[in-house]
Image (cartoon, rainbow, N blue to C red):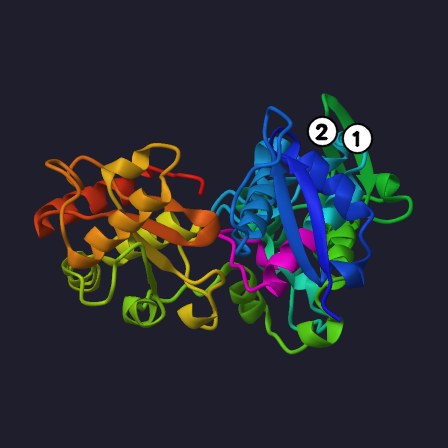
Amino acid sequence: ECKTILIKIHRRRLFEDGFQHMKSIADDVLKHHVKIMFVNELGLDEVGIDQDGVLKEFLEETIRYALNPTFGLFCVTEENNWLYPSPLSKIHYEHLDLFRYIGRIIAKAVYEGIVIDISFAPFFIRQLLHNKNALFSYLDELPSLDAELHKNLMFIKEYQGDIQDLGLTFSVDDEEFGRVVTEELMPGGSFTPVTSTNKISYIHQIAHYKMYTQIHKQTRAFCAGFRSIINDDWLRMFSLPELQKLISGDCSSIDLSDLKKNVRYLGGYHGNHRVILWFWDITLNEFTEEEKSALLKFVTSCSRPPLMGFASMSPPFSIRAVDESEETTEMTPGQALRSSFKSFLGMQQGSSSGNCRLPTSSTCFNLLKLPVYRNKSTLREKLRYAINCGAGFELS
């Protein structure tokens, strides 16, 4: 039996409300259809049409907020800006519960087929998979986290003099909130000197500590939350690159012809409308790969296509005709019918309609609001400006 769960979220407390509500929802229940209702600043329920777009918005905004390094739960690698748990996440009182919550939220996005524009560090996301590769080495992966530390460890490995002159022990000094904390790599490590005979063990233990031990509790909590939604048996079917694609979409070139096959037209637009013909000619034949990614991010909030193609995108990619009369907050039924009818016939709504407005989007619905432009050059200019400047986000 399909159940629907209704969750009320105050926009000003989106992350906090979501965290509190989700704690009371059982894992098997969360897999059912979840309906989000936002409450505005006045304490009133927001009116809108729920086509899974509000859920998408909630998941994306929650993930964006939680994974922002300034929040303190995650940090990024120096070279690739890959995300991984912050060793200092305990600045948050319930940080392990928060990691479990984030794991559930990201798993829910995967479960619903919603791709998110993030890149996790391979050494972190690998923990979701139980298939440990015997050839995997944290030391080999260390440059992706800290290239300078890896360089220093290689210096120790190749050091020809007496290694004890460096005064190293099997311990690590970490700075935590203004004070130095010493962590031992092994029992009695603070009193065990690094010598020429044990230096190989030392550099491997340093790498293991930095990439595993230091964030083990956070990683375990995240994985527990993720696996509570995505069954372990399902995860075992994927390799590490495949799991990354499942979460963040496909990094290959964007096939806009596939998007064209799976688009939905609204507000009077149709496949043979002159503006639509111009739109596809521009995006298919003139856009660079960077512009295609920018267009996709502008409309869906993710620059990468779904792993299973655009046919699997939910809600489906849509283009709706708009005109300047829709800048008002409400339209009468007669105005809405007239707007759709004129758009269908390719007529102008007024003397300047469609020439001043920029294209806008509602990313929660994967919806592009495209004005009825008079000519192709104006469409090209306005579309490029909008997607490159991030202008014109609107909430439906």
State the residue at coordinates (65%, 72%). 135
Q: Amino acid at mark 1?
A: Val
Q: Is residue 289 shown left or right of residue 11?
A: left
Q: Amino acid at mark 2?
A: Glu
- Residue 106 is one of the magenta-drawn residues: yes
| Tally of numbered tags | 2
Give the quarter of the image for residue 392: top left
The magenta region covers 104-122
Task: Note whether 359 is above or below 41 in the view shown.
Answer: below
Task: Tell me residue 190's x, y (percent).
Answer: 85, 39
Q: Earlier in the sequence, mark 2 or mark 1?
A: 2
Give yes or no for contact between labels 2 and 1 (Cβ–Cβ under 8 Å). Answer: yes
Name which residue lies at 62% across and 30% down.
44
Q: Depth check: 65 or 282 in front?
A: 282
Would you say residue 133 sits in the magenta stretch? no
* Residue at 74% from the left image edge and 71% from the top image edge: 232
Residue 175 numbered mark, or none: 2
Element under label 1? strand
Classify mark 1: residues with Cα within 10 Å, few (<14), some (14-19) or many (20+): few
Q: Residues within 10 Å of mark 2 (few under 14, many from 20)?
A: few
- Position of residue 134 relative to residue 353, above or below, is below
Q: Is residue 331 above or below residue 60?
A: above
In percent of the image, x 21 and y 64: which residue is there?
284
> In the rendered image, is residue 36 in sight?
yes
Give the labeled residue for mark 1: 181
Residue 171 seen in the figure: no
Work out which quarter of the rendered image holds the C terminus and state it.
top left
- Between the C-alphas of marks 2 and 1, the distance is 6 Å
Q: Quadrant of the N terminus?
A: bottom right
